[in-house]
Amino acid sequence: MKSRNLYLAVLAIGVFSMSSCKTSKSEEVKEGAAAVVTVIQAPNIVGVAAGNENFSTLVAAVKAANLVETLSSVGPFTVFAPTNTAFAKLPEGTVASLLEPANKGALTSILTHHVVAGKFDAAAVVAAINANEGTFAITTVQGGTLVASLNGENVILTDENGNVATVVIADVAASNGLIHAIDHVVMPK
């Protein structure tokens, strides 16, 4: 009964406090009126990437592959996002070639090879690696496999071609998932 009385007391204080508040439009909030709560939501994966200059190449590629709508959908997704520096490590002319409309299929395949269905924070990835004798196979939405392992405390990803990328920033929150920045582009088979 004490907890019910405490709840009612807190509720009464909240209603009393609201009755003396003003909204941003300087309108009085009537006693007993429902409070209007504004929820500020984090941007989606595309919005987070677009808001960071280190992902400008990735954002240009997502636009060229017409994946903006997909990566803006509900998800959740986990994106292993190559930084601009990662894209710059590709052979000269590769990025420019991939951004051409004729290469949209190849670009889409590469980008979706960096996306995993579901929300996997760094702690979950490390736990999965440790629970599976040091490696954890991750199926991408492209259908390929990335193998996660640890190099010291760093999570590394190895693609089916033997290319390796290190997670350099983990757990960047978005409204529809997470982004883990990586230092190399991983490629599908």
Image (cartoon, rainbow, N blue to C red):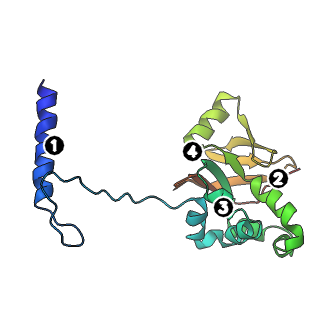
Q: Are marks 1 and 4 in contact (CB under 8 Å)?
A: no
Tell me where residue 112 sits by quadrant.
Answer: bottom right
Is any part of residue 182 visible from this angle?
no
Please state which of residues 78 and 7 is positioned toward the viewer in this rendering. Answer: 7
The quarter of the picture where residue 94 lies is bottom right
Is there a contact, CB below 8 Å, between mark 2 and mark 3?
no
The residue that label 4 is drawn on is 121
The mark nearer the N terminus, 1 or 4, is 1
Mark closest to the chain's N terminus, 2 or 3: 3
Residue on which disc 2 sits? 163
Q: Which residue is mark 3?
A: 69
Q: CA distance from mark 2 to mark 4?
A: 22 Å
Q: Is residue 46 above or below residue 97?
A: above
Residue 68 drawn at (x, y percent)? 67, 64
Q: Residues within 10 Å of mark 1 (few under 14, many from 20)?
A: few
At label 3, counting other C-alpha atoms closer than 10 Å, the crowd grade (few under 14, some 14-19, many 20 or more) is: few
Q: Secondary structure at mark 3?
A: helix
Give the x, y percent position of residue 120.
60, 43
Marks 1 and 4, how far apart in space?
Answer: 36 Å
Label 2 neighbour load within 10 Å: few <14, some 14-19, many 20+: some
Inspect this view and state whether residue 5 appears. Answer: yes
Rendering quarter of residue 184 = bottom right
Which badge, 2 or 1, comes first in the chain's sequence? 1
Q: Which residue is mark 1?
A: 11
| Residue 28 at x, y percent in the picture | 14, 66
Q: Residue at x 57, y 44 (%)?
A: 121
Whether the residues at callouts 3 and 4 have beta carbons within 8 Å, the answer is: no
Type of amino acid at the residue the image marks with label 3: Glu
